[in-house]
């Protein structure tokens, strides 16, 4: 389609979170892409967050896997495909179908997922295919199925705007689903009477924007919603008509939940006053939406947490009506598509059940397959344990990085090292998991792929290719079909393109579907290539049988249990996890605003790396004092023999007894910050989702001989240092490090030329270096016995710039400009590259609201994700002035 500039732009979908924003992408040159929000996409209506807005900076080919490899040697596709097919076939022949596995990803498109699932469940005959979405929303799937009889998200994004009360629980929406947060904030501006309650142990940017923040004790979620159920049942908070006509099981659920306000307060760590405020607000507000995400799902009782929330909505009949309902939001762009297509080890395709013989027969008949898996396969954590103990002898990992993102990450890495046959199809040549592969298969990346994804509100959108396939890379669906054909399953995988696969998938959803299955897109089963190419974002269902298109579910019942009623599920409050007798703390892992998954894509962007350029450990001041941690010092975090080293960030946004660390940093970008090595493989017994937010860890100060900060055009060789973290910056890199040897020798090992400008202060032990290529800054390195106090963004801004004047070069060695406010300061607004100094200056010049700061500096006028930080700066300056 032409855009306003007259250049052709392609309508596609963002590859990051489950909001599923529409993107207009325009190729300007070989590695230059311009992106903008698609004003016609119903998920975002033109908005993008900082990650989406920076997509154009991530399409370069540096580090791309461009050719198939066997044993680290380049090979051709025919050889690679035959080798993979032959090794899988031999393993299956010798050890049975359950000796092989696929570990797939929410980055795959529906068409990729569909053929992978078909191959494993219908032709290999095992259900050993599981997706990394297991780590993000399996508890929501299980909770939905227990209550509704189907994995149905009842509502739509619009409900968040129509609600009078939005409850966000276990969701840092402002950072993790920013465009949905923007929509919510815009609705609040129009209707200031609307209320937002945030339930989160941390005072996140989302919590800071709430009308009421409930800083719940970690693990108190079930108790809170049981307390709410009790409150609603004992007062006039019920919809008895809805309960009587559309549900069963209230009595048992209520008996299990029953708790006094006092007991609920004790179990949640909240005061009775806080509970009363929340419960009364919920009771009084008909139009209430409860949004939940990983903070609910990633727990050993995640499925109970989900059902405790659903119970409250069923009791009030607030489900499937405008502005009402429980709303699970997914973490990945196609996590929802993976659920629909059968990417989980315990589901068949199109929301059919493995345990249901009728469903198995339907799917097998439809596929004309020689077999069909008849029992659930290994879920993610068990799958890698199966690799470790030898049950899995051949595994194919597609578009994900389990050596970083899985709990027990070191065990996973070792298991893959020891596994007889590991295939990785991916984009990135040097991702941690790719390094462990016997066979590497180059896959198409975002912008090169063509297919569909489903977002959190059941909306199917097209990802369209607008870049040529680089090197010999191929779309995932084609790689999978090639292997299937080489294994002798030609006819069933003879697809000419993604549209062929989509038609088959849509037809299966309607096959034998008499209305007993929620997922039905049968009306799209005749779509031709041209219509598939034009396909507008389409919310399911799209049923041929009854003509139903999109919309909400369950306002008038019609659940998918055999009696068409929903189930109240008893969710007893578990005994509280009393603080361990030792001095351990609870480690909560999660996301930050500007990074995605294991940074294989976002790590390429300077802008995104500028916001938080280093992994960190957020600690409450009282814990920091008790442990002896200093701000900006380093902490060693351990769980048994597993260790990580992280930068200390002391903040009262953190609760006492609990710490937070981001999950993004891999071995590509850091020396010891793969925090999932600290997380045990504890899973929810119903969903199999790992508890990624409640590891018990011990913390102590880590005291290196020196701390360092540097910038470099070339990637510095940091391996071997006690601590390091690397980030993209302008034409090169910036890095933080620490060491135990001589910093001058370390600089040489990093690759700095020995003839660089140097300064050594024998009295303090400080060492500084600046290297030039001609008169351009090629790199700089500052080391000191204490954490380095340099103006980092000023220094990184000079990288590659000409600095002919000797006095300016001397200032470089000082690590800061002569005028303390001359540099940009810490990056606040990634979209417009605005630093803290410019914002502070605007505040000093009279800006008193985020909007006025935006007018003066452009900060916060892009995606708006930084507005809470701007608000905090406004408060800080106003407090300072008052003092
Ligand atoms: Fe992408 Fe941001 Fe939209 Fe999520 S909110 S889909 S990351 S642009």
Image (cartoon, helix red, strand yellow):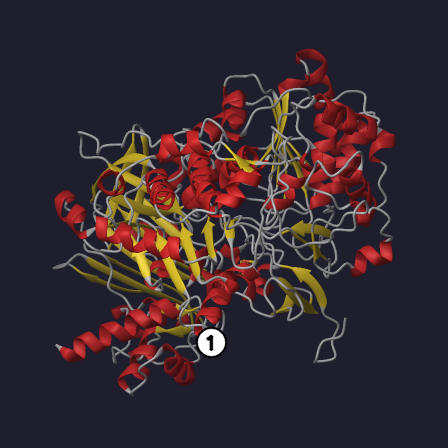
The image quadrant where one finds ligand 1 is bottom right
Q: Is mark 1 within 8 Å of ligand 1?
A: no
Residue at x 25% of width, y 45% of height: 635
Quarter where residue 632 is shown = bottom left
SS of the residue at dot 1? loop
The C terminus, quarter of image: bottom left
Q: How many marks?
A: 1
Residue at x 69% of width, y 42% of height: 519
Q: Residues within 10 Å of mark 1 (few under 14, many from 20)?
A: some
Give residue 489's position: percent from left, percent from top: 83, 27
Give residue 51's position: percent from left, percent from top: 52, 61
Quarter where residue 708 is shown = bottom left
Residue at x 21% of width, y 31% of height: 580
Left or right placement of residue 393 versus residue 782 in this view: right
Residue at x 39% of width, y 85% of height: 856
Q: Is residue 473 visible?
A: yes
- Residue located beneath label 1 in the image: 861
Q: Up-down: is 65 above or below 840?
A: above
Name the one closer to the observer, 657 or 145: 145
Left or right placement of residue 395 versus residue 76 in this view: left
Name the one closer to the observer, 737 or 691: 691
Left or right placement of residue 753 versus residue 477 in this view: left
Can you name the residue that lies furthest to the top here?
94
């Amino acid at each position: 389609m032409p855009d306003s500039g007259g250049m052709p732009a392609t309508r596609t979908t963002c590859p990051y979170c489950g909001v599923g924003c529409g993107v207009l992408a325009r190729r300007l040159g070989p590695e230059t892409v311009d992106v903008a929000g698609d004003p016609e996409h119903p998920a975002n209506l033109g908005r993008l967050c900082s990650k989406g807005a920076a997509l154009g900076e991530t399409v370069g080919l540096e580090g791309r896997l461009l050719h198939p490899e066997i044993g680290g040697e380049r090979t051709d596709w025919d050889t690679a495909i035959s080798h993979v097919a032959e090794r899988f076939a031999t393993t299956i022949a010798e050890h049975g179908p359950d000796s092989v596995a696929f570990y797939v990803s929410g980055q795959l498109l529906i068409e990729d997922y569909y053929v992978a699932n078909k191959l494993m469940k219908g032709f290999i005959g095992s259900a050993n295919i599981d997706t990394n979405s297991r780590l993000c929303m399996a508890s929501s799937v299980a909770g939905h199925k227990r209550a509704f009889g189907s994995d149905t998200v009842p509502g739509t994004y619009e409900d968040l705007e129509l609600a009078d009360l939005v409850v966000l629980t276990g969701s840092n929406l402002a950072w993790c689903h920013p465009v949905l947060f923007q929509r919510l904030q815009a609705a609040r501006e129009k209707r200031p009477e609307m209320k937002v309650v945030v339930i989160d142990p941390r005072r996140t940017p989302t919590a800071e924007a709430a009308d009421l923040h409930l800083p719940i004790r970690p693990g108190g979620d079930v108790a809170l919603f049981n307390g709410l159920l009790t409150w609603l049942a004992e007062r006039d908070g019920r919809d008895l008509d809805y309960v009587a006509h559309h549900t069963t099981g209230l009595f048992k659920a209520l008996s299990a939940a029953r708790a006094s306000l006092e007991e609920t307060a004790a179990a949640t760590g909240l005061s009775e006053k806080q509970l009363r405020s929340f419960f009364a607000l919920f009771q009084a507000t008909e139009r209430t939406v409860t949004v939940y995400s990983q903070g609910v799902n990633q727990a050993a009782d995640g499925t109970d947490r989900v059902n405790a929330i659903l119970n409250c909505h069923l009791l009030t009949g607030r489900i499937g009506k405008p502005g009402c309902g429980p709303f699970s939001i997914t973490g990945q762009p196609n996590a929802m598509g993976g659920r629909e297509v059968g990417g989980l080890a315990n589901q068949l395709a199109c929301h059919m059940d493995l345990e249901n013989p009728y469903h198995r027969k339907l799917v097998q008949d439809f596929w004309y397959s020689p077999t069909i898996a008849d029992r659930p396969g290994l879920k993610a954590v068990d799958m890698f344990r199966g690799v470790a103990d030898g049950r899995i002898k051949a595994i194919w990992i597609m578009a994900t990085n389990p050596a970083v993102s899985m709990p027990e990450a070191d065990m996973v890495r070792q298991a893959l090292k020891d596994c007889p046959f590991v295939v990785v199809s991916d984009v990135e040549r040097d991702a941690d998991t790719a390094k462990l592969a016997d066979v590497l298969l180059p896959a198409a990346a975002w912008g090169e792929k063509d297919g569909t994804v489903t977002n959190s509100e059941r909306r199917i959108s097209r990802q369209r290719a607008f870049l040529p396939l680089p090197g010999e890379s191929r779309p995932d669906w084609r790689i999978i079909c090639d292997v299937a054909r080489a294994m002798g399953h030609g006819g069933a995988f003879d697809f000419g393109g993604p549209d062929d696969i989509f038609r088959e998938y849509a037809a299966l959803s309607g096959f034998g579907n008499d209305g007993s299955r929620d997922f039905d897109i049968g009306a799209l089963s005749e779509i031709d290539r041209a219509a598939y190419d034009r396909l507008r974002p389409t919310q399911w269902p799209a049923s041929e049988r009854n003509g139903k298109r999109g919309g909400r579910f369950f306002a008038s019942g019609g659940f998918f249990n055999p009696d068409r009623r929903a189930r109240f599920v008893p969710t007893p409050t578990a005994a509280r996890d009393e603080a361990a007798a030792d001095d351990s703390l609870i480690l909560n892992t999660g996301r930050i605003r500007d990074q995605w998954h294991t940074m294989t894509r976002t790590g390429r962007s300077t802008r995104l790396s500028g916001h938080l350029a280093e992994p960190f450990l957020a600690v409450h001041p009282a814990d920091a004092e008790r442990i002896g941690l200093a701000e900006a010092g380093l902490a060693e975090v351990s769980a048994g023999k597993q260790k990580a080293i992280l930068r200390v960030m002391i903040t009262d946004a953190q609760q006492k007894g609990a710490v937070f660390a981001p999950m993004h940093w891999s071995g590509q970008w850091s020396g010891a910050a793969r925090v999932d090595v600290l997380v045990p493989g504890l899973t929810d017994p119903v969903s199999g989702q790992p508890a990624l937010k409640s590891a018990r860890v011990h913390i102590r100060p880590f005291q290196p001989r020196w701390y360092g900060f540097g910038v470099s055009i070339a990637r510095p060789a940091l391996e071997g240092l006690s601590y390091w973290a690397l980030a993209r910056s302008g034409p090169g890199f910036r890095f933080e490090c620490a060491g135990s040897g001589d910093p001058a020798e370390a600089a040489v090992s990093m690759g700095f030329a020995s003839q660089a400008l140097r300064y050594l202060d024998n009295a303090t032990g400080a060492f500084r270096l600046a290297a030039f290529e001609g008169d351009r800054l090629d790199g700089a390195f500052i080391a000191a016995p204490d954490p380095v106090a340099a103006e980092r963004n000023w220094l990184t801004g000079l990288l590659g710039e000409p600095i002919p004047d000797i006095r300016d070069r001397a200032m470089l060695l000082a690590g800061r400009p002569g005028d303390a406010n001359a540099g940009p300061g810490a990056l606040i607004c990634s979209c417009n590259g605005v630093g803290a100094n410019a914002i502070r200056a605007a505040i000093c010049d009279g800006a008193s609201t985020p909007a006025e700061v935006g007018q003066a500096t452009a900060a916060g006028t892009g995606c708006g994700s930084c507005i809470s930080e701007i608000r905090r700066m406004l408060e800080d300056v106003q407090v300072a002035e008052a003092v």
